[in-house]
Amino acid sequence: MEHIFREVVESNGLLSAFVVVGLIMAFSFWISKIMHHRIPAVALAVFLGLVLALLGKKKGLSDLPMFGGLALLGGSMFRDFTIVATAMGADITKIKEAGLAGAVSLVVGVLLSFFLGAGMAWMLGYTDPKVMATLGAGACTYIVGPVTGGALGVSSDIMAMSVAIGLVKVIVTTLITPWVAHAIGLNNPKTAMVYGGLLGTTSGVTAGLAATDEKLVPYGALTSTFFTGLGCLLCPSVLYFVLVFLTTNP
């Protein structure tokens, strides 16, 4: 019986992955309900996913043949499809209302994240502009970090650090969004777009907004996705050369 079960699961990897994710979400919502929703269910699900990722050596739980479908479900193709599909739910009239505020939030968000990350890298002793740029890009998102590191030719351990920085940002954003939403007026599409533009981490913003108000998710996803694109464009080019200038002309 065990052999048949394993064979069925392994031969239907993607479907099995959906079942696993569904069970994790159901468990997270149950725990969140017990805790009177003090911690968002989405945040718990992200935390459980990170814990399960420790079970594998390279690709987390998907290293086990029985859970191989998780590698496909959690891969870049499904991630990008989900982001685009989510953003497609945004109302164009609401997007226009964000106007200049949305555009400014993108620029400010990228610059703030990049230079905060690069500044922290410098304080920790990383004075090479390439390394500073990669770690600063990681503070933007865990996607911008390795893209920048690859373009500048830094070592794999520095790129791994940039990914880790981006993942920490995802977790923190996911956890704090529901708690600060009321204080910062995060209750309408315009502020959701500005919020997504300032923070940029699509995974964290969408998860946090989902725990706050599901109707706001498409708007935060829209600007946070643009944030990633803008970061990939600016960090390995203009912002890197700014760091070169600053480090060679103290």
Image (tube, grey):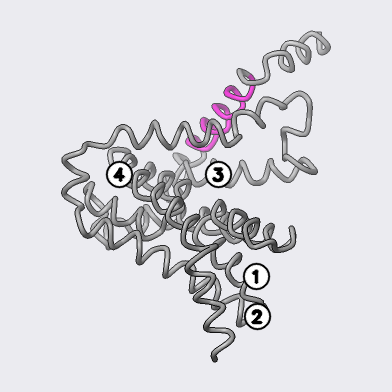
Which residue bears the numbered disc 2?
127
Left or right of 95? Residue 214 is right
- CA distance for labels 2 and 3: 33 Å
Number of numbered discs visible in the structure rendering: 4
Say which element carries label 2: loop
Q: Are marks 3 and 1 in contact (CB under 8 Å)?
A: no
Q: Earlier in the sequence, mark 2 or mark 3?
A: 3
- Give the residue type that dot 4 points to: Tyr
Which residue bears the numbered disc 1?
131
236 or 72: nearer the eye? 236
- Give the residue type that dot 1 points to: Val
Viewport quadrant of the C terminus = bottom right
Rendered image quadrant of residue 10: top right
Q: Earlier in the sequence, mark 2 or mark 4?
A: 2
131 or 185: nearer the eye? 131
Q: Are marks 1 and 2 in contact (CB under 8 Å)?
A: yes
Q: Earlier in the sequence, mark 4 or mark 1?
A: 1
- CA distance for labels 3 and 1: 28 Å
